[in-house]
Amino acid sequence: MPEGDTVWQAAKRLHVALAGKALTRSDFRVPQYATVDLTGRTVLNTAPRGKHLLTRFEGGLTLHTHLRMEGAWKVYGTGERWRGGPGHQIRVILGAADAMAVGYRLPVLEFLRTSEEERVVGHLGPDLLGPDWDPRLALANLLADPGRPLGEALLDQRNLAGIGNVYKSELCFLLGVTPWLPVGALPAECAEQLTATAKRLLETNRERPVRRTTDRPRQDLYVYGRAHRPCLRCGTPVRVADQGDGSQERPTYWCPACQAGPAPRPGAAQKWRERYPRIPR
């Protein structure tokens, strides 16, 4: 699932493959940009900004892409078989003499002037993996709405950029509070640890092929994706329920014994019990 570390890795792959090279192939398979041809233009760089990718070209152009849930950028060498998905899922191909970058299932793909990038990323809070990281501002943003559930506040990229649904669940577990705890009710020690722990998790994983939040062999995550399985700390079955504002709800995992705070609204957990029957231990 794309989160800040995933996007950082994608940006690095694109940058290494294309930066400083003139394009030998340019193929945009979306109606709005079907006639765009960047062949001959030099790629300057690709930079991540939270969950956004900004690929810049000479002449002051930027390609803005966002992976959301299903998107992916794949880089292939000369003659290498493309394995990112069927051809109809390809949205863009950018090729140099020795590398081919292919964007699959990209839900956001748009061109803009490089000078206007703030139009698409200016709303973001401090980036956990970016040069603008400011833990005090990130915490102040989170605490600005003290009644908001912590899980929802963490997913709001206007507060801090880079946390997705996996890190939301794992971070709340590591802090020992449920994702439904109002931000303003965070114990002082948790508030101090929150941004530092989030920063550590993403920095530790940005170079890893498999995301890990635990120090346990063969166990990558504490709670995410572990519905009904025993908690790695106390053995209590991990629970799952929807969390969100109604328009965009996400499955949220927590241990009712290890994490203090309110439970989800009635009915949220039942929906997930019906969708995910009990998993054998």
Image (tube, helix red, strand yellow):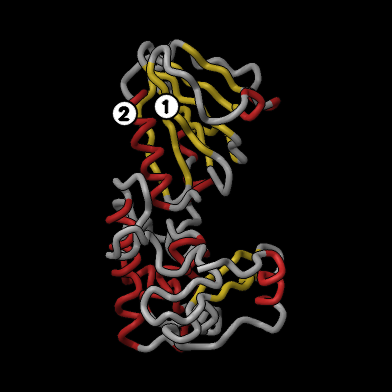
Q: Which residue reaches farthest front?
A: 280
Answer above or below: position of 20 versus 6: above
Q: How dense is the environment of label 1, judged by Cα within 10 Å: few (below 14), some, or many (20 and up)?
A: many
Identify the mark at residue 130; answer none if there is no mark.
none
Q: Residue at x 41, y 47 (%)?
A: 6
Q: CA distance from mark 1 to mark 2?
A: 10 Å
Question: Earlier along the polypeptide chain: callout 1 or callout 2?
Answer: 2
Residue pointed to by mark 2: 16
Residue pointed to by mark 1: 75
Where is residue 197 shown, x and y percent of the image? Answer: 31, 69
Relative horizontal placement of residue 172, taking residue 209 as reference (left or right): right
Where is residue 24 shown, x and y percent of the image? Answer: 44, 10
Relative horizontal placement of residue 95, taking residue 233 as reference (left or right): right
Answer above or below: position of 134 versus 112: below
Relative horizontal placement of residue 262, taking residue 17 as reference (left or right): right
Answer above or below: position of 261 versus 9: below
Q: Residue at x 53, y 43 (%)?
A: 67
Which quadrant of the figure has residue 16? top left
Q: Amino acid at mark 2?
A: Val
Q: Is residue 157 visible?
A: no
Asked whether disc 1 touches disc 2, contact meaning CB atoms under 8 Å apart, the reply is yes
Q: Residue at x 34, y 70 (%)?
A: 195
Determine the secondary structure under disc 1: strand
Q: Amino acid at mark 1?
A: Val
